[in-house]
Amino acid sequence: MLERRHTMELEYLAKTIDAVCVPVVVLDRELTIIAANPSAQKAFAGLTLGASAAKAISKKRGFLNRLGQVLEQPVEKTLILKTKEGFGQEFLTTIKPLDLGRAGLAARLLLTFEDRSPLKDVKTMRSEFVANVSHEIRSPLTAITGIIETLQSTAKDDPEARAHFLDLMGREAARMVNLVTDLLSLSQVEVKQRRRPRKSVDPNQIIAQAMNTARQLAQKRGMVLDFRGPYTLPALPGLHDDLVRVFINLLENAVNYGREGGEITLIACIKDSTNPLAQPALAISVTDQGEGIPAADIPHLTERFYRVDKSRSRNVGGTGLGLAIVKHILVRHRGKLVITSQLGQGSTFCVYLPLKPPQKT
Ligand SMILES: Nc1ncnc2c1ncn2[C@@H]1O[C@H](COP(=O)(O)OP(=O)(O)O)[C@@H](O)[C@H]1O
Ligand SMILES: [Mg+2]
């Protein structure tokens, strides 16, 4: 009779914790699992009723000690539990003493697990970003400090050397200005990433403006900019200045990493729904004749500060943020960037932009 009542109580307990959406596990005095909800079974692969907490959840001494402590002295305790599964998830684990009186005799501890991993990822990303920015700022600063020392000592009375070093200093300062400008643009486009563009823009004007800016750079490297496509592209929803920035960044890269004296081609065309956006789109591609990009690097190019060849990027005044800015602007426009490249032949960066405003959901 009593046993039957226990079974019923246990079923009742199991049903209650099933309704909870975070992982919940109930242990008895022997630290055996007597109830666990589906979330817990998902979080800890192979968790079964009747298994020991050590086997099913964690063998870590800290965890098992805590369980023992709460059994002895019924006071709630928490700890961070790291698991290897799921690429090292991190759970804030709360151990609560349970006293269900005669009804739930066996149940002694109630464990809940709060997944802290996404939070940890944000923290890691933030500290990586700060480390990257600090590093990027420190190198020009170190260079400038060195130059100042030289100007104060060896180059003090040498006008020619002085001019040379001031020139170098100017370049390093320009690098810092570029970096700060790009960081500001990045944070601005990131903040506005979710706001969809309401106005309509003229892609013909956008292309013309970006090409005018890039043409001067291209001429310096003896490169030719070539536009192919109709001059009567239809208007589409977008932000003029942001889209000009997208094509300036892509054209600048084509100039910087393309072949000296080579050609850069910008092709615009209207696509039906058979494109990566799966809806009618404007496709604008920028193709250069540079060395190309190894396939393994392509998926990472839009990450902040990712560069295939660091010193080359720095030499041309790059910040490693150009494509990250492009990506964020395109997210806002519900567009896409597709990168293809053939080593030794060149690369193509194709931007797809939807022709119609996104449907409200
Ligand atoms: N057209 C291209 N050809 C070859 N490599 C490119 C091209 N565009 C970009 N890359 C690579 O992608 C990296 C990231 O580009 P970007 O975000 O614009 O930063 P930056 O140009 O400031 O280095 C560059 O450093 C370069 O290694
Ligand atoms: Mg760039």
Image (cartoon, grey):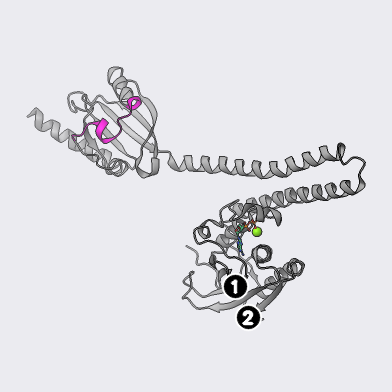
As drawn, the residue found furthest toward the top would be 73
Amino acid type indicated by mark 1:
Ile
Question: Disc 1, disc 2: CB below 8 Å?
Answer: yes
Mark 1: few, some, or many residues within 10 Å (few <14, many ≥20)? many
Pick the residue in front: 278 or 142: 142
The residue that appears at 59% across and 72% down in the rendered structure is 285
Residue 304 falls within the magenta-colored stretch:
no
Whether residue 58 appears in magenta in the rendering, the answer is yes
- Based on the displayed image, in which of its 4 quarters is residue 228 positioned? bottom right
Q: As drawn, is 285 to the left or to the right of 149? A: left
The secondary element bearing badge 2 is classed as: loop
Give the magenta range: 50-63
Identify the residue at horizontal 65%, vertical 63% (top origin): 257
For ligand 1, which image quadrant applies? bottom right
Task: Report which residue position mark 1 lands on.
Answer: 284
Q: Quadrant of the N terminus?
A: top left
Q: Earlier in the sequence, mark 1 or mark 2?
A: 2
Residue 355 x/y as whole percent: 56, 73
